[in-house]
Amino acid sequence: QVQLQESGPGLVKPSQTLSLTCTVSGGSISGANSYWNWIRQPAGKGLEWIGRIHTSGSTIYNPSLKSRVTISLDTSKNQFSLNLSSVTAADTAVYYCARGPVSQIGFWGQGTLVTVAS
Amino acid sequence: QSVLTQPPSVSAAPGQKVTISCSGSSSNIGNNYVSWYQQLPGTAPKLLIYENIKRPSGIPDRFSGSKSGTSATLGITGLQTGDEADYYCGTWDSSLSAGIFGGGTKLTVL
């Protein structure tokens, strides 16, 4: 059973870079033909897809965030990461890592709250 | 404002049936698979339906999905108080080249 766990700072200052890591257990991040996603949810609001990386290393990002987002794989640690630059209060949200195409995201992390504040 | 349109809320009595709609366009629902997710308060979303109509192992057959043209529907029969949650549809948008979700529907079991 694949499990995902987000980790990273819970508080980030405005204009700085938000960095989160998702650790995958119960399966190899590079062994399956899989998509690894980052999705966020501001308090009381809906889900927003941030982007994904394929096991091949190819990435696709939400056009609304593309200029600020980088998603990368670290196969040696069975992890993938999110960097979101130049953050503002609007980036405050619960951030989820998840596996699968958007049509079938079967595995989700528990989510981690990131607050952008000085 | 979401690319996929869902009603903000629906409600029904225990034991009854409810449907939740998800309306899109030819660039998303019309030409891509739809999934549905249940999010209980304070928890991560859970996959209920994938590829329009399929249920993952462990999801009861009280939950069903359908798709017609540029709209999709989630059906829930035999409503239970434990079904009270937010429900989201999701799909790929070929024009945006991005994953998208509906705005979510809050289900209340009266």
Image: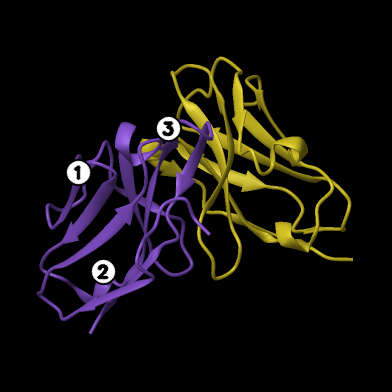
Residue B87 drawn above or below residue A96: below
Q: Position of residue A1 (x, y in %)?
A: 38, 36
Q: Residues within 10 Å of mark 2 (few under 14, many from 20)?
A: some
Task: State the residue at coordinates (77%, 63%).
Answer: A89
Residues at circles 1 and 3 in contact by the CB criterion of under 8 Å: no
State the separation of the CA atoms marked 2 and 3. Answer: 25 Å
Say how many tags the image has: 3
Q: Label 2 sits on what residue type?
A: Asp
- Name the residue: 76% across, 36% down: A67
Q: Which is nearer the N-term, disc 2 or disc 1?
A: 1
Q: Which chain is purple?
A: B
Residue topped by disc 1: B68
Q: Give the structural element (helix, strand or loop) at label 2.
A: helix
Q: Chain of mark 3?
A: A
Q: Mark 2, mark 1: which one is toward the viewer? A: 1
Tell me the colour chain A is drawn in. Answer: yellow
Query: Is circle 2 on the same chain as circle 3?
Result: no
Looking at the rendered structure, the kind of residue marked 1 is: Ser
Q: Residue A101, which numbered label?
A: 3
Give the secondary structure at mark 1: strand
Q: Position of residue A14 (x, y in %)?
A: 87, 58
Left or right side of B92 for A23: right
Q: CA distance from mark 1 to mark 3?
A: 21 Å
Q: Residue at x 36, y 37 (%)?
A: A103
- The quarter of the displayed image where residue A63 is located: top right
- The three-letter code of the residue at mark 3 reads Pro
Position of residue B26 in the picture relative to residue B100 (left or right): left
Image quarter where the C terminus of chain A lies is bottom right
- Output the chain of dot 1: B
Question: Which residue is disc 2 drawn over?
Answer: B83
